[in-house]
Image (cartoon, grey):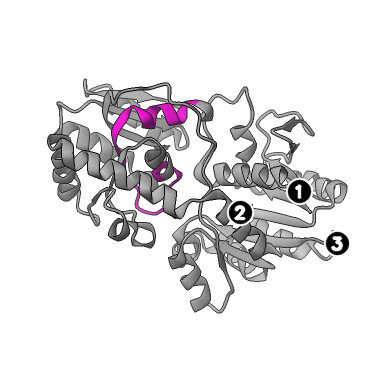
Amino acid sequence: MKFLFLSRGAHLVWDPAAPCAAGGAELQAALMARALSRLGHRSILLGADTGQQDGVEWQGIRVRNGGHYETGKLADTLRAWFKIHRILQEERPDVVVVYGWTALLYALAWWRKIVPFKLAFVCALDAEIDGEFLRSNPLRGLFFHRGMGSADARLSITEDQAAAFRRQAMSCQVTRLLVADRTPSATTSKTLDLLWVARCEEVKRPALFLDLAQKLPWARCRMICAPHDRVLWQEMQARAACHPNVEFLEGVPYAEIQNHFDAAKIFVNTSSHEGVPNTFIHAGLGRTAIASLEIDPDKMFDSFAAGVMARGNFEDLTSGVQHLLDEPAALNAAANESTRFVDEWHDNDRNVASFLQGVS
């Protein structure tokens, strides 16, 4: 079968010249494309224009340049749509896969009448199905929601998301996140206490990590904060410079990101909304405990005592992190549970098979 993944930045995962890592949904699109290619399917990544050569191949995956469809500006989207239509006609995919929200999902659902294919949507964030995105973005959210309902297949990354789909009379198949190939660690010791990794945007609440660093001035902290909201990023950069215990990095290439988790004792998540953070998987691969202010996909912390689940309480997050750093036995136990979480929930063979079942 031929699969085409519409993902603005998934190709950056395999681009050897990319300066920084892609986001979580983009990473999963890239990993799934490669996994399918390894099984003998044909995979295409239709990315937004980041300067990539149209038609180049990385990791056995064909990369197409779809123009600037990701900006949210109507003129950019209309110009890009002509490119996307041409690529669909040229590639003639059996399945078009979309990870995460985009108003283009509705356009793709309608376009199947002209260029036939099966449309599959993979829910990346709880907000895409629980109504939060629709409330925050009434017009784009309406088109997206209609496209989601019109898709031939819907997949989720948690059981909770699948249940939300079914409550709205939409079928759904659960396929948990894939794990990247593990390379030998370049780090042999835990030289960092706390690590924070995310794109700089309000939903990630980066300021709370700096608040945590301020409350624990003796902790060695690293913040990998890729620019997304440029104004917020500049504010975070300036704030971080005021904390001598915080190392602030703009971004790192995807091939290097695991080294930072390997070096950290605790990974800290301060987001208000996510599906399943890819960073939780990186933490498990690095035997790194997880401290989450609010994100608890499928109540994973009830099944895996991987660190701290603060249930939205910042003081509990702070005290929980301090306890782990003060008690080596507790930290070691949490690190083991973090690894067990990845081993038990994120088996690639099982999850790729689930994906194929969901789109068949």
Query: Of circles 3 and 1, which is in front?
Result: 1
Number of residues whose C-alpha sits closer than 10 Å to that of mark 2, classed few (under 14), some (14–19) or many (20 or more): many
Is residue 246 in the magenta section? no
Instruction: Give the structural element (helix, strand or loop) at label 1.
Output: loop
Seen from the viewer's position, the closer of residues 206 and 25 is 25
Q: Specify the quadrant of the image occupied by residue 83.
A: top right
Instruction: Give the structural element (helix, strand or loop) at label 2.
Output: helix
Q: What's drawn in magenta, residue-wise?
A: 256-280
Q: Which mark is residue 114?
A: 3
Asked if one can make out residue 84 in the rendered structure from this viewpoint, the answer is yes
Tell me which residue sits at (38%, 28%) in the image: 260
Q: Which mark is residue 41?
A: 1
Number of residues whose C-alpha sits closer than 10 Å to that of mark 3, classed few (under 14), some (14–19) or many (20 or more): few
Which residue in the structure is indicated by mark 2?
A: 352
Quarter of the rendering occupied by the C terminus:
bottom right
> How far across and down, in percent of the image, does residue 35 sit?
65, 45
Q: Where 130 falls versus 37 (above or below)?
A: below
The amino acid type of the residue labelled 1 equals His
Tell me which residue sits at (21%, 39%) in the image: 331
Q: Earlier in the sequence, mark 2 or mark 3?
A: 3
Q: Specify the quadrant of the image occupied by residue 286.
A: top left
The amino acid type of the residue labelled 3 equals Ile
Asked if one can make out residue 101 in the rendered structure from this viewpoint, the answer is no
> How far across and down, in percent of the image, does residue 121 sit?
62, 60
The amino acid type of the residue labelled 2 equals Val
Q: Is residue 240 left or right of residue 168?
A: left
Instruction: Give the structural element (helix, strand or loop) at label 3.
Output: loop
